[in-house]
Image (spheres, rainbow, N blue to C red):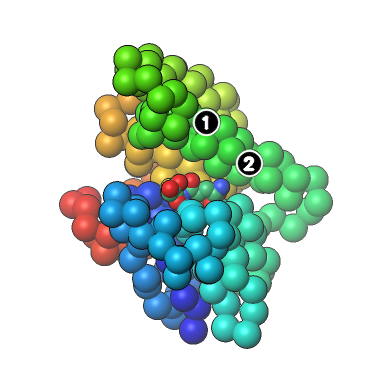
C-alpha cells in the first residue's frame, strides 16, 4: 500500500485529490507543520528537505516534490488520462504545472504564509506579505489566459495540473484574494467533482 505524508489544507491536498481520483488504497500519515513535525529526525530520514507531500511506494521510490509525485501517479495509471499523450502536450502540461508549483506556490504564497523566511526584521513582514499577494494576483492572471473564459480545465480534460491549480485557488479563497473569472470558474468546476468535495471534508473543511 502507498504511504502518504500530508497536511490538511496544504499543497498535499492536490496529491490527495489525485490519489482518490485514481481510487488507490493508501495510508495517511499526518504531518503537523505548525508543530514542526517536518523537522523531526524520523521525517528528515524520509525526506531530508523537510517538506510534504511525500509518497512512499512499497518496494519502490520515496517520492517527494509535488510535480514528481503527480507525474508518477499519472504515468503509473495511464488509463485515467491524467497526463496527455503527445510529447508537446506533456511539455505544455509541465509548463503550467511548474509555474503553479514553482512560482504561484513557492514564490507568491510562501511570502504570504511565511514572510519571516524572507526577512528577519519584523517590520518587513507586512510588505513581504503584500508583495506575495501581488505576485499571486499576477500569477493567476497569467493562468487565467490559459483557461476557457467560463472556467473549465486547463487542458480540455482533468489533468494533474488541475489538482495543482486547485490547491492554490483554495488558498486564494482562504486569504480572500480575488481570482480572475476563469480561475473562479475552474475552482467552481473542481468543487463539483465528488472526489474534491470528499477530500476537503476528509481534511476537515466544510464544502
Ligand atoms: N517543492 C516542494 C515544496 C512543497 C512545500 O513547500 N510544502 C510545504 C507545505 S505546502 C511544506 O512542506 N512546508 C514545510 C516547511 O517548509 O517547513 C514540492 O513541490 O513538493
Residue at x 36% of width, y 60% of height = 37
Q: Neighbour class for label 1 at 10 Å: few (<14), some, many (≥20)? A: some
Residue at x 38% of width, y 34% of height = 114
Task: Please state which of residues 116 and 184 is positioned toward the viewer in this rendering.
Answer: 116
Q: Secondary structure at mark 1?
A: helix
Task: Please state which of residues 57 and 202 is positioned toward the viewer in this rendering.
Answer: 57
Task: Please state which of residues 164 and 41 is positioned toward the viewer in this rendering.
Answer: 41
Q: Is residue 174 visible?
A: yes
Q: Secondary structure at mark 2?
A: helix
Q: Which mark is residue 107?
A: 1
Lower position in the chain sequence, tag 1 or tag 2: 2
Residue at x 27% of width, y 59% of height = 203
Query: Is the CB of the residue bearing disc 2 within 8 angstroms of ligand 1?
Result: no
Q: Which mark is residue 156?
A: none
Spatial separation of the CA atoms under disc 1 and disc 2: 12 Å
**Left or right placement of residue 143 versus residue 35 in this view:** right
**Left or right placement of residue 79 versus residue 118 in this view:** right
Query: Is the CB of the residue bearing disc 1 within 8 angstroms of ligand 1?
Result: no
Q: Neighbour class for label 2 at 10 Å: few (<14), some, many (≥20)? A: some
Q: Which mark is residue 98?
A: 2
Task: Please state which of residues 85 and 37 is positioned toward the viewer in this rendering.
Answer: 37
Q: Position of residue 156 (x, y in %)?
A: 59, 46
Amino acid at each position: 500500500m502507498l504511504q502518504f505524508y500530508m497536511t490538511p489544507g496544504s499543497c498535499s491536498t492536490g496529491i490527495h485529490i489525485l490519489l482518490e481520483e485514481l481510487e488507490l488504497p493508501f495510508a495517511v500519515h499526518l504531518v503537523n507543520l505548525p508543530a514542526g513535525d517536518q523537522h523531526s529526525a524520523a521525517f528528515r530520514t524520509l525526506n531530508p528537505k523537510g517538506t510534504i507531500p511525500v509518497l512512499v511506494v512499497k518496494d519502490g521510490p520515496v517520492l517527494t516534490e509535488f510535480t514528481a509525485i503527480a507525474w508518477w501517479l499519472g504515468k503509473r495509471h495511464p488509463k485515467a488520462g491524467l497526463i496527455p499523450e503527445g510529447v508537446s502536450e506533456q511539455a505544455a502540461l509541465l509548463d503550467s504545472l511548474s509555474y503553479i508549483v514553482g512560482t504561484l506556490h513557492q514564490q507568491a504564497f510562501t511570502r504570504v504564509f511565511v514572510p519571516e523566511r524572507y526577512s528577519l526584521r519584523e517590520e518587513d513582514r507586512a510588505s513581504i506579505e503584500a508583495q506575495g499577494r501581488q505576485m499571486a494576483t499576477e500569477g493567476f492572471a497569467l493562468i487565467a489566459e490559459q483557461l476557457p473564459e467560463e472556467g473549465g480545465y486547463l487542458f480540455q480534460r482533468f489533468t494533474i495540473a488541475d489538482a495543482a491549480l486547485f490547491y492554490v485557488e483554495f488558498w486564494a479563497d482562504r486569504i480572500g484574494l480575488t481570482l480572475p473569472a476563469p480561475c473562479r470558474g475552474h475552482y467552481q468546476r473542481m468543487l463539483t467533482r465528488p472526489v474534491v468535495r470528499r477530500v476537503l471534508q476528509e481534511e476537515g473543511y466544510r464544502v
